[in-house]
Image (tube, grey):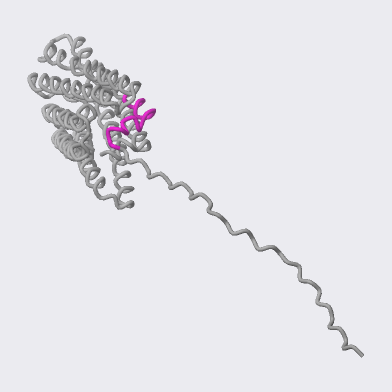
Amino acid sequence: MRQLINSPRVMLMLAAAAAVGALAAVLAGLSFALASVFDTGAAHDLRVGAAWIGFAAWLIAIVAVARLGWQLILESRWTPVAEIGGVVISVLLITIGALVDALDVTGRRGSGGGVLAAVGFGLLGLAVLVVAARQSIAEFRENVQPHRRSAYLWSFGAGAAILYAIAVGLTDTPLGLAGTTDVTQGDLIASGVLALLCWAVLIAVAAGALRVGIARLATVQGLVVALGILVLSAIALIVAAATQIPVSADLTGFRVAFSLPEFLLAVGLLVLASISAARGDAFGGLASRVQPAPRPAPAPPGPTTPPAAETTPMPVSPPEPPGV
């Protein structure tokens, strides 16, 4: 999990996944905006396109996470491999859920991918909770000051993932929370409330990261803007479900009310994509990045033995002849 945050290349791929997901949300919003009781062809085609593009977004995400996991395996870093393995399984389930949703929508059947997606988000929350526990133990052993501890941030992130898992399970679709209209009014309102709580908790996590000094101010500001837009999306969904279900004879209110949450979701995803692409290692401090050991300074040169003076051999004089 830590390596996931610390890898700019993975964050760049996740930024691409968020951008593709934003496109899927736009198409989903257009499917509501063009809804009609007389001709549902255009709306259905847009919904099918949104479902398949949403599957492509999650496919990019699983490739990014799995690629990092394989790199850690090659480096024999087994503890990070276990952490990333949980994330890979979670995202894989969400990806399969998105695929099932796309197949069901294409065949004009009821969606069943939301169950798998909900399980995936739930497992993701458990994986983050394990990281929170390990971080708490490490901070206790190192006697980290209370105002510098970050384990609780991981715990809040795990709680946010579990909240969103329940929200997805209520709407039975992994593509946004208004991706289907065959749910009850109460379920849709509850989904919006849970999504709102999820984004609010993540805003608190971003603020806490700034407070303990492990995130840049500009990054936290961008995250607060993006998550604030997602909060507005959840509020719009709650209002739409409360005022437009059951559907009235006039479809204008229905079109505007249910397309707005998807459009706001798209804007929020685009902001998150820009943050991930520009600042992929913004939360390096949260992961307790290990700094490379400094290279030992070269030893000062010791006294050297001066080279022996070159001596020129004296010419050997011939022996004197014996006297006469």
Pick whichever, 152 or 272, lies toward us: 152
Pick whichever, 279 or 88, lies toward us: 279
> Which region of the structure is painted magenta?
272-288
Q: Quadrant of residue 238?
A: top left
Q: Quadrant of residue 61?
A: top left
Instruction: Determine the residue located farthest toward the front in the rendered image.
Output: 324
Q: Quadrant of residue 150?
A: top left
Q: Residue at x 27, y 31 (%)?
A: 54
Q: Residue at x 11, y 15 (%)?
A: 245
Q: Is residue 42 magenta?
A: no
Q: Residue at x 15, y 13 (%)?
A: 239
Evaluate whether residue 61 shows in this view.
yes
The N terminus lies in quadrant: top left
Q: Position of residue 276 (x, y in %)?
A: 34, 29
Q: Is residue 306 above or below residue 117?
A: below
Q: Position of residue 316 (x, y in %)?
A: 81, 77
